[in-house]
């Protein structure tokens, strides 16, 4: 384990283009449950598909009820040592940036700038009808007070949705292509806190590895890409990142 930490640090130090891929596991130490945790907001409610959201006022109300409850967790969460370490690595030029599946915005709050949010962000809403974007907080407040789905202040009655990718919605094509390019060009890929089973996102570290990058996986449980990893660090994301940082 110690040798693996040292080797991962050595690869990162020598890398020309190290890319970090993160999932929900890096944020659990900030108090945001991951996808599979029992009792998490994500497991408690039924899924509202994108088509339903577009077509049904009842589905939009269900969606907003769920999102407003989840919002409390995001709003109260602070970046942890894992997020902060990655922000520092970007500043000192150790990594090129982060591709994340997370929607919590904690990488940016920690100071990271090069962040690709594949699944969007829960810190904004946007209008499906006129495409205007707004910070999420006032609309969450409004829903809490009125229990009515807020409408777009820009066009008057547009349908407002969180700026995250819903089930049934495809990932933004240009962003995904850029993410693939980063992995294609990477010599080290560090995957942190993702079960690496949700495609197409999980295919990114895989593509990098097949192109010759070293693949380092930090995750508490087994992942979909353990078989092809060069180094596996099972355990806490925060502890592993702090340990690697000490060696760098
Ligand atoms: P996932 O739930 O499928 O996998 C998370 C992985 O992290 C698990 O394998 C778990 O073993 C591991 N993990 C949890 N806590 C850890 C810790 N402290 N240290 C090390 N490993 C830990 O999540 P996913 O693969 O990222 O996919 C779920 C999807 O749901 C995401 O794509 C995202 O869009 C959404 N989601 C986002 C958030 C967020 O933004 N924080 C939270 C939950 C779900
Ligand atoms: Zn609008």
Image (tube, rainbow, N blue to C red):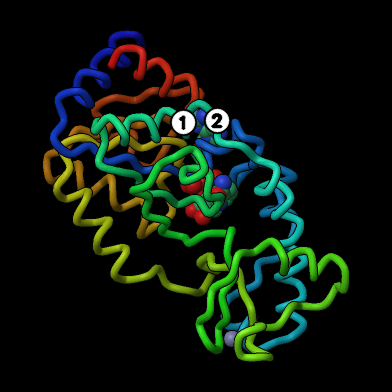
Q: Residue 80 carries which label?
A: 2
Q: Position of residue 96 (x, y in %)?
A: 25, 41
What residue lies at 53% left-to-right and 54% top-to-bottom? 103
Q: Position of residue 145 (x, y in %)?
A: 87, 68
What residue lies at 47% left-to-right and 43% top-to-bottom? 107
Q: Is residue 174 left or right of residue 131?
A: left
Q: Residue 84 carries which label?
A: 1
- Say which of 72 and 196 sits in front: 72
Q: Residue 15 carries which label?
A: none
The vertical placement of 171 against 31, above or below, is below
Q: Position of residue 234 (x, y in %)?
A: 44, 23
Number of labels in the image equals 2
- Say which of 222 and 84 sits in front: 84
Specify the quadrant of the image occupied by residue 205.
Answer: top left
What residue lies at 28% left-to-right and 24% top-to-bottom? 231
Residue count near mark 2 (Cα–Cα under 10 Å), binned few <14, some 14–19, many ≥20: some
- The alpha-carbon separation of the residues under discs 1 and 2 comes to 6 Å
What residue lies at 44% left-to-right and 40% top-to-bottom? 111
Q: Is residue 203 left or right of residue 30?
A: left
Of helix, strand and loop, which one carries label 2?
Answer: loop
Q: Where is residue 163 in the image (x, y as percent from the top left)?
A: 54, 68
Assess whether mark 2 and mark 1 are in contact (beta carbons under 8 angstroms): yes
Pick out the residue farthest to the top: 2
Q: Is residue 166 left or right of residue 67?
A: left
Specify the quadrant of the image occupied by residue 127.
Answer: bottom right
- Viewport quadrant of the C terminus: top left
The vertical placement of 8 against 27, above or below, is above
């Amino acid at each position: 384990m110690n040798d693996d930490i040292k080797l991962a640090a050595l690869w990162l130090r020598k890398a020309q283009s190290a890319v970090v891929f993160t999932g929900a596991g890096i944020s659990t130490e900030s108090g945001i449950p991951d996808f599979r945790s029992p009792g998490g907001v994500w497991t408690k409610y039924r899924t509202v598909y994108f088509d339903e959201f577009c077509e049904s006022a009842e589905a939009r109300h269900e969606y907003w009820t769920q999102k407003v409850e989840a919002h409390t967790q995001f709003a109260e969460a602070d970046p942890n040592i894992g997020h902060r370490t990655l922000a520092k690595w970007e500043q000192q030029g150790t990594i090129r940036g982060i591709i994340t599946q997370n929607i919590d915005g904690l990488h940016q709050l920690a100071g990271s700038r090069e962040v690709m949010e594949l699944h969007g962000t829960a810190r904004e809403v946007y209008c499906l009808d006129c495409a205007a974007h707004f910070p999420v907080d006032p609309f969450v407040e409004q829903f809490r007070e009125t229990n009515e789905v807020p409408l777009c202040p820009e066009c008057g009655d547009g349908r407002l949705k969180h700026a995250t990718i819903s089930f049934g919605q495809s990932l933004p094509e240009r962003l995904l292509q850029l993410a693939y390019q980063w992995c294609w060009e990477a010599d080290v890929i560090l995957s942190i806190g993702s079960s690496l089973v949700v495609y197409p996102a999980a295919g990114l570290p895989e593509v990098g590895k097949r192109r010759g990058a070293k693949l380092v996986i930090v995750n508490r449980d087994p992942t979909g890409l353990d078989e092809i990893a060069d180094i596996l660090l099972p355990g806490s994301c925060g502890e592993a990142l702090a340990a690697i940082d000490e060696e760098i």
